C-alpha cells in the first residue's frame, strides 16, 4: 500500500495536529513504518493512529462505559426484561454525563444490545422479553463521553445453565484473552484472528466470519476491521496509537449467521444454536496493550 506520510516535508506541520514540525514529531515514527512497508507489511493510515490526547479522552470514555457495565451487571438476572435493562442503562448513562452510542445509530432503536442464546449480536431490548433460567445473554454497551467512545460487552449466564453453554461462554472469554496477548507493537492483526480461531476450533466451536472488531474512539466504527479468523504475519501492522475492539463471536454450532429481515438488526445463528461474545476496547502503546473498556 502507499504510505500516506510520504509527501510530508521535514519542516511541514506534523500530520498529528500537534503544531510541531514533522521532523520534531512523527518523522522518526514514520521512517520506522516505511521500513516495514518496504518489506511488504500493510501499514495503517495516519487516521488510524490516535494522539496521546485522543487516547486520554477515549480512556475516560472507556472508564465510564466500564462503570455502566458494572452497574447494569447486578440487574442481568432471571425475571428481568431486556427492556428494563435498557431503561436502567440509559438512565445511569445520563447520570454519568454520557450518551448511549447505539441509540438512533443508523436507526437502531435502543440504548444497548441484549443478545440471548442464538442471537449473535444486535439483539434489540424488549419489555416483553423476560430473561429465563438456562439462557446466556450478551450485554453490549457503547458510551459517548466528552465526544469520545468507549465500547465493551460481557456475557451473563442466567440461572441453571447447561454445561455446553457454560463452556461456550468460558471458551469465548479465553479466545478474547488470547487475542489481547497478540496485540504487541509491530506484530500483525492477523495474529489476533489466528489464535482466536485456533482456540475456538480446538474446543469444537466455530467463529463468526462476517462480523468483527473495529477501530473506535473518535467515531463508533472506524478502520481497521478486526477479523477473528486470521493468518499469522498478515493484515495490518500493529502500530502504537491504534485503538480498536476485539469482540469474538463464537458459535456452538456452525459459523453461518443471518440478519432478521423484519427489524434489520438482530443477527442469529442460522442453525439456531447458541452464540457467545466478549468485547474489549484496546489501545496499543510503545510498551504494550492497554484495555480501555471491558
Image (cartoon, helix red, strand yellow):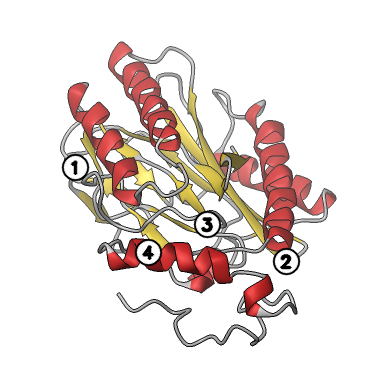
Element carrying mark 3: loop
C-alpha separation, residue under disc 4 versus residue under disc 2: 35 Å
Badge 2 marks a residue whose secondary structure is loop
Q: Quadrant of residue 14?
A: bottom right
Q: Earlier in the sequence, mark 2 or mark 3?
A: 2
- Name the front one of labels 4 and 3: 4
Measure how far apart labels 1 and 2 are at the Cα level: 36 Å
Indicate the quadrant containing the N terminus: top left, top right, bottom left or bottom right.
Answer: bottom left
Q: CA distance from mark 4 to mark 3?
A: 18 Å
Q: Is residue 277 left or right of residue 55?
A: left
Q: Which mark is residue 20?
A: none
Question: Based on the displayed image, in which of its 4 quarters is residue 275 positioned?
Answer: top left
Callout 3: few (<14), some (14-19), or many (20+) C-alpha neighbours within 10 Å? many
- Do the residues under discs 4 and 3 have CB atoms within 8 angstroms? no
Residue that carries the numbered disc 2 in the rendered image: 147
Residue at x 26%, y 27% (from the top left corner)? 199
Q: Is residue 259 left or right of residue 32?
A: left
Image x and y of residue 179, in percent:
39, 36
Where disc 1 sits, the SS reads loop
Residue under pointer 4: 35
Question: Which is nearer the eye, 267 or 41?
Answer: 41
Label 4: how many residues lie within 10 Å, few (<14), some (14-19) or many (20+)?
Answer: few
Mark 2–mark 3 Cα distance, whole angstroms, equals 18 Å
Identify which residue is drawn at 56% across, 26% down: 79
| Lateral position of residue 90 relative to residue 198, left or right | right
N-terminal of the two: label 1 or label 2?
2
Task: State the mark number for residue 255.
Answer: 1
Q: Nearer the viewer, mark 1 or mark 4?
A: 4
Label 2 Cα neighbours within 10 Å, binned few <14 / some 14-19 / many ≥20: some
Q: Are marks 1 and 3 in contact (CB under 8 Å)?
A: no
Residue 127 visible here: no
Question: Which callout, 1 or 3, points at the residue further toward the start of the chain?
Answer: 3
Amino acid at each position: 500500500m502507499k504510505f500516506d506520510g510520504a509527501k510530508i516535508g521535514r519542516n511541514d506541520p506534523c500530520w498529528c495536529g500537534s503544531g510541531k514540525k514533522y521532523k520534531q514529531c512523527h518523522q522518526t515514527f514514520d521512517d520506522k513504518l516505511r521500513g516495514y512497508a518496504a518489506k511488504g507489511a500493510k501499514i495503517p493510515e495516519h487516521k488510524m493512529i490516535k494522539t496521546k490526547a485522543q487516547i486520554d479522552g477515549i480512556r475516560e470514555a472507556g472508564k465510564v462505559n466500564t462503570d455502566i457495565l458494572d452497574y447494569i451487571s447486578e440487574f442481568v438476572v432471571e425475571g428481568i426484561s431486556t427492556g428494563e435493562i435498557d431503561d436502567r442503562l440509559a438512565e445511569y448513562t445520563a447520570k454519568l454525563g454520557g450518551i448511549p452510542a447505539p441509540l438512533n445509530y443508523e436507526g437502531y432503536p435502543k440504548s444497548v444490545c441484549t443478545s440471548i442464546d442464538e442471537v449473535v449480536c444486535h439483539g434489540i431490548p424488549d419489555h416483553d422479553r423476560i430473561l429465563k433460567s438456562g439462557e446466556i445473554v450478551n450485554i453490549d454497551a457503547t458510551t459517548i463521553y466528552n465526544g469520545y467512545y468507549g465500547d465493551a460487552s460481557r456475557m451473563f449466564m442466567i440461572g441453571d445453565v447447561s454445561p455446553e453453554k457454560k463452556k461456550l461462554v468460558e471458551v469465548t472469554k479465553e479466545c478474547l484473552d488470547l487475542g489481547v496477548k497478540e496485540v504487541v507493537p509491530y506484530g500483525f492483526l492477523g495474529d489476533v484472528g489466528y489464535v482466536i480461531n485456533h482456540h475456538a476450533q480446538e474446543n469444537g466451536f466455530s467463529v463468526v466470519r462476517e462480523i468483527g472488531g473495529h477501530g473506535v474512539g473518535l467515531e463508533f466504527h472506524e478502520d481497521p476491521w478486526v477479523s477473528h479468523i486470521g493468518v499469522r504475519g498478515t493484515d495490518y501492522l500493529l502500530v502504537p496509537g491504534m485503538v480498536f475492539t476485539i469482540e469474538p463471536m463464537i458459535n456452538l454450532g456452525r459459523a453461518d449467521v443471518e440478519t432478521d429481515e423484519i427489524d434489520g438488526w438482530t443477527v442469529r445463528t442460522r442453525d439456531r444454536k447458541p452464540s457467545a461474545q466478549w468485547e474489549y476496547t484496546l489501545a496499543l502503546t510503545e510498551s504494550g496493550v492497554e484495555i480501555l473498556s471491558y
